[in-house]
Image (tube, rainbow, N blue to C red):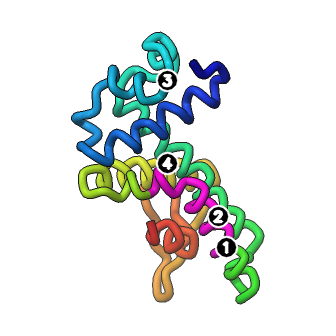
Amino acid sequence: MRSSKTGIKEAICDSLCLLAQSKPKEKVSITSLIGAAGICRSSFYYHYESIDDVFADMVNEFCREYQSIGFQVLNTKAHRDREGLLKAEEAFCDVILKYKGWVVFFFERSNYFDFREIFYRQFQERCRAMHITMLYKEQRSELRDRVTYSYSIYSCCMQM
């Protein structure tokens, strides 16, 4: 049995990716998930209520890291020169490699739209919190709640 909180959550997430290779995540049972993760049922329910909660947590963790790179690029204006863009690209790739198994899982046909919805919801919340502006080449576009989004960071996130 795993003991650390981080280790348990990682085991659950990795096990979901593994089990979902042979069937859609909707068909993965909690019993099979806890068996594959090597944890007890109470440990699962301490962290999550359902398989969908596990998936959402995985996407949120990935998004936090991936989007934080984009916002660092924007805040430091690293996107304005070639060297800055190369460093940013390397940082984005590092995050994707760190979560390689998860990313493959996210982009499977049955998971992609759920992933995209969570990704963009989190991105928009972060933009609102930071009051970031979006500028297009020929126009300035204001979105809901007097919040606008940066075109450059939005473009980075669109790559996903």
Q: Does the magenta segment cover residue 99?
A: yes
Q: Nearer the viewer, residue 40 or 9?
A: 40
Label 2–label 3 contact, CB within 8 A: no
Q: Earlier in the sequence, mark 2 or mark 3?
A: 3
- How far apart, in angstroms, are the residues tagged by discs 3 and 4? 31 Å
Q: Is residue 146 visible?
A: no
- Helix, strand or loop at label 4? It is helix
**In the displayed structure, would residue 82 be above or below residue 51?**
below
- Cα gap from disc 2 to disc 3, whole angstroms: 28 Å
Q: CA distance from mark 2 to mark 1?
A: 6 Å
Residue extent of the magenta highlight: 88-103
Indicate yes or no whether the magenta region holds residue 79.
Answer: no
Most foreground residue, 150 or 55: 55
Is 144 positioned to the left or the right of 113 in the image? right
- Residue assigned mark 1: 90
Name the residue carrying label 2. Answer: 94
Task: From the top left corner, tell me how far across and down residue 75 is, in percent.
Answer: 73, 66
Residue at which label 4 appears:
122
Image coordinates of residue 29 in percent, x first then y, are: 28, 26
Viewed as shown, does residue 7 lie left or right of 39? right
- At label 2, the amino acid type is Asp
- Tell me residue 149's x, y (percent): 52, 65
- Image marks 2 and 1: residues in contact by CB distance under 8 Å: yes
For the residues labelled 2 and 4, say whether their Cβ atoms are less than 8 Å apart.
Answer: no
Q: Main secondary structure of the magenta part?
A: helix
Marking on residue 38: 3
- Marks 2/4: CA–CA distance: 20 Å
At a point 71% along the width and 89% down the height, the residue shown is: 82
Comparing labels 1 and 3, the label whose residue is closer to the camera: 3
10 Å crowding of disc 2: few (<14), some (14-19), many (20+): few
Q: Is disc 1 placed on a helix, strand or loop?
A: helix
- Closer to us: mark 2 or mark 4? 2
